[in-house]
Image (tube, rainbow, N blue to C red):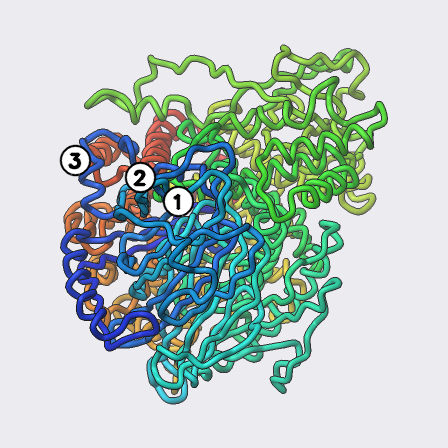
Amino acid sequence: MNSSQMSVTGSRAEFITEDYPNIKYGRGGGCFVSHAKAALFLLLAAAAVIVTGLLVYYYAPCPRAGEFVSSLSLEDQDALSDGSQGVAEGAGRRLPTEVRPSSYNLCICTLFDSNFTFDGRVYIDVTVVDGTKNLRSVTLHTGKDLKIIQKDVVVFKKSSANQTDNYSCEPGPSNSNETKENVVPIQYQSFENSSDFYIIHFRGDGLEAGGNYTLSIPFEGKLKDNLYGFYRSSFKDSVSGEKRWVAVTQFEATYARDAFPCFDEPGLKATFSVSLARPPSGFSLSNMRIQSTQPTTAGPKGWIWDHYEPSPPMSTYLLAFLVAPDSTSMQQHRTDSKSSVASPGTIGGNNTSFSIWTRPGFNNSSEYALNLGMNVLRFYEKYFGVNYPMTKMEMVAVPDFGAGAMENWGLVTYRESVLLYDPSKDSSSHKVDVALTVTHELAHQWFGNLVTMKWWKDLWLNEGFATYVEYIGTNAIEPDWVMLDRFVTEELQTTMSYDSLRSTHAVSPGNSTTADSAAIAELFDSVSYGKGSCLVRMLNHTLGEETFRKGLTSYLRKWSYANAEQDDLWEALTEAARSDGKGNSPLPNGLSVKDVMDTWTLQEGFPVVSVIRNYSDGSARISQERFVMDPKAKKAVEGKEGADASAEDDAAPPPKEKWHIPVTYTSAAERSFQNTKPRFWLLSGEGDHELPRGSFPASAQWVVFNLQETGFYRVNYDERNWFLLSNALLGNDSEVGKGPAGTGGRLPDVTKAQIIDDALSLARAGQLNYTIALGVTTFLSKETELVPWTAALGSFRFLDEVLSHTSHYGMLEKYILKLLEPIFLALHEKADITSLNQKLLRSMVMKWACHLNHEDCLSRSIRLFKEWMKSPDPNVNNPVPVEDRRAVYCTAVRKGGSTEWSFLWKRFKESTNDSSAAEVMLPALACTREPWILSKLFSELLEKEDDKRVIRLQDVYIVLRGISRNPVASRIFFQYIKNTWDALHKRYGGSTIVLGEMVKAGLSGLSSAKDLQEAKDFRKRNARKFRFATQDLDQAEESLADRVLWLNKNLEEVSVWLSGQVALGESDTADL
Ligand SMILES: [Zn+2]
């Protein structure tokens, strides 16, 4: 999935949840249950409702777009909760291993009646593993809301695994191999809710070892609007104004079981033959092509079965289907979409067709993703050395979608805003989001779909790879965007800031076997996505492009249609390195890729490498230790009641973690930034590394380590080298200006970004003097490129947050504005920029200049917003330039009152057919500083009535993100959460992840010891409601403690430095 952009405070996607206190079944007949049966079923279902109680769904997704979910009833939570944290015994068990499914024939009839019911039957061919005893029961998964029609469940023996069956979707016997003689008698059926288990118990001998059987299970369910499982999505037809419905799936991670009973683990791959019943006016889609259509006999009159071709072997979470009652609900776009005539774009050897589905219209806005998608799929075939194995690729923009996107094989689903791009009204950053999301999902077609992780603990293999490869794919299609440089600021530096906390976790959580849905959902975080991608990139550069690709291709070929673990990938890459190396392997002596990578994936955190030069003889001493932002912060969180977070006495013991680190470097004389193969290794088991005399040139020349920041580590230097680097950035370097970046002239943009981010992070962690670190930033007044500016403003964000409630904030504002002024003046009135990166830079500079109250920026924004307010039809006529909308909206709302806010709120409410416009307006609504308006916005999160709800469930996280960036709003929000906690808990069905995200947004603006104590008290009072969000909350609390400690330690030094800098530019700073 793609979840990363959705995070409130980082790359974690969000999920939102719903409570379903009134699940009711009942309908006038379907394809599988007769009227009489339906009446009986209604009674059973009513009983089930009472037993099941409230159901809870939450979804936690990928950094750009978000990804996945879980379900746990409140009763389950209560049952599990004894006040202790973690998963109770027995919760979330793995399936027994004696039975393996080989194929599914799945028939589903979606009724779109007033209760949104569906019914179906699944035939699962299974084999009992040889060498086991006869089985008296078989266990599979079923969702808590799915109703199994127990009396019609049949299990029968097949003569062999290869016996071909002709399963029927119509009621009655399967009309295949089922006879009286081969039916296995069932004694009873039972359920184990904590693991979503459905168990069929047999009479007599049960199932024989080595035997082949078919399970035939009828079921019935309800399409909910929780964005997971098989759910319903709606939109208003822009012409008729009528509400249209679409039923669609989202199965990752553990939601296939909500649609049909199945063996819902990624390692249990099988083929799927899907049949979907629909009204004659409707249509359906699935992973494969339609093989045949056929009228139903038992279904509603005139209904049709769409029978799909069997899929290749794949995991349940990758299955997908979509049904709409009206074929005009969605429109297909192909390469010549304007004529809507089929024109298959061929991919590889399969004559693969490629298309996009949207609501009606959107011809222009689907064109970009369509062309990009086709091109990148072709590119990946070459890059991976393996053809795309499916016969078609359809990408669907779904009106309600929890994650960013989902890589279902051959039928990728997206949130509308990350698939559709209209150049006339969407910004450049939106275009980049679309490109990165599409390239991410299509990379999964190989990494994830063709070869899948054995178990969720190796999720990072899927997501880390897709996140890295999305940059390679985008770079191949859009080379001008320099995405390989931007990876450093967009992924690596943001990930390092999370991973610098003591409360981070390892990329691969060792031998974790938990099958609890909520715990699995927690794995979809910035560590799996972001750090995973950084480690893959490090390996790519360490091994070299050719070796890396060779190992990758052999891994994909060897494990196609199967499941693998990280060790299998390491083995393929080790082999490639050894055969390519011919005695000159890039790996250190005797070590394998596994030896190296285990220190990075099984161990949490990452190192800082220290370089201390001896300037008299040109030698240097290189050492490593774990980099932690402030080791005392976690202690302050964990401290006893009333402990003073600022206590200096109990310093943390020095961490012992060590890594095998590939080290690269260059010097002012050498300027070889391109060679990213290691020059030496800093090994985990060894002490400091000594570079001999003469390794480095004359004392007046700088050295830089970790070229292009390809290693996942920071670098600290002695003060003199920092000074030399600072000088080089300022252009006081003898070689400056003599050639293009990195070749003998200026420092490369990535290196500038690296130096800024390392320096300010080291200072924040107390490992570098702030005077030196801030000194590094003074060159920015001459900087004109996106990548260094992104790193700089990203680093300033911390100072901006932490100083926002102090009397020194005005000086920070002046200092950053002084750096920004030249680039602001150069770009802000420039309407003719063509370079995408310059557009992005301009937009970022505008946002910051307005945020820091630059007079011209404020007046321009307010003027443009006023013009919009006066427009005759503001929903159509918007004079605010597309690239400036985020900055202008936020500024106008922040500086304005209820008139501006209400105007924007109205535009938001009326933007129902333009989700990307809505996503730009929504965060701006949280920019107001008026407490009463903020309260009004917050109260929208509690709106219970469906028809009155303005903020879609899928968009709650966007509001939270806006709140977390407004120091006034987040403080008020924390009080609001405390006051309305019970109501929020009820509204969001007890979803710990959504509630955890809310608390994170509330804590983000706090920075005093008293705040920390209040946060701890609040969490303690509600401990049991946060059980599965502990990791997020640990991080939010540690960050808060870090700010408290920082203020005690650094405020004075920073403010003295800032006042000195500001005074250099002005004569009168007395009133600051
Ligand atoms: Zn993904």
Tell me the SS state at disc 2: helix
Category of crowding for the residue at label 3, using alpha-carbon neighbours closer than 10 angstroms: few (below 14), some (14–19), many (at least 20): few
Residue corresponding to mark 1: 521
Category of crowding for the residue at label 1, using alpha-carbon neighbours closer than 10 angstroms: few (below 14), some (14–19), many (at least 20): many
- Nearer-N-terminus badge (1/2): 1
- Residue at 79%, 34% in the rendered image: 671
Amino acid bearing label 1:
Ala
Q: Position of residue 965 (x, y in %)?
A: 37, 50
- Nearer-N-terminus badge (3/2): 3
The quadrant holding residue 623 is top right
Tell me the SS state at disc 3: helix
As rendered, which of 298 and 485 lies closer to the eye? 298
Residue corresponding to mark 3: 1021
The quadrant holding residue 503 is top left
Looking at the image, is mark 3 or mark 2 nearer the viewer? 2
Q: Position of residue 1026 (x, y in %)?
A: 26, 39
Counting the numbered discs, the total is 3
Residue corresponding to mark 2: 1028
Amino acid bearing label 3:
Arg
User: In the displayed structure, would residue 294 be above or below residue 709?
Assistant: below
Verify CB contact (< 8 Å) between mark 1 and mark 2.
yes
Tell me if 24 is positioned left or right of 136 in this view: left
- Residue at 56%, 73% in the rendered image: 290
Estimate the spatial distance between the alpha carbons at disc 3 and disc 2, rounded to whole Å: 16 Å
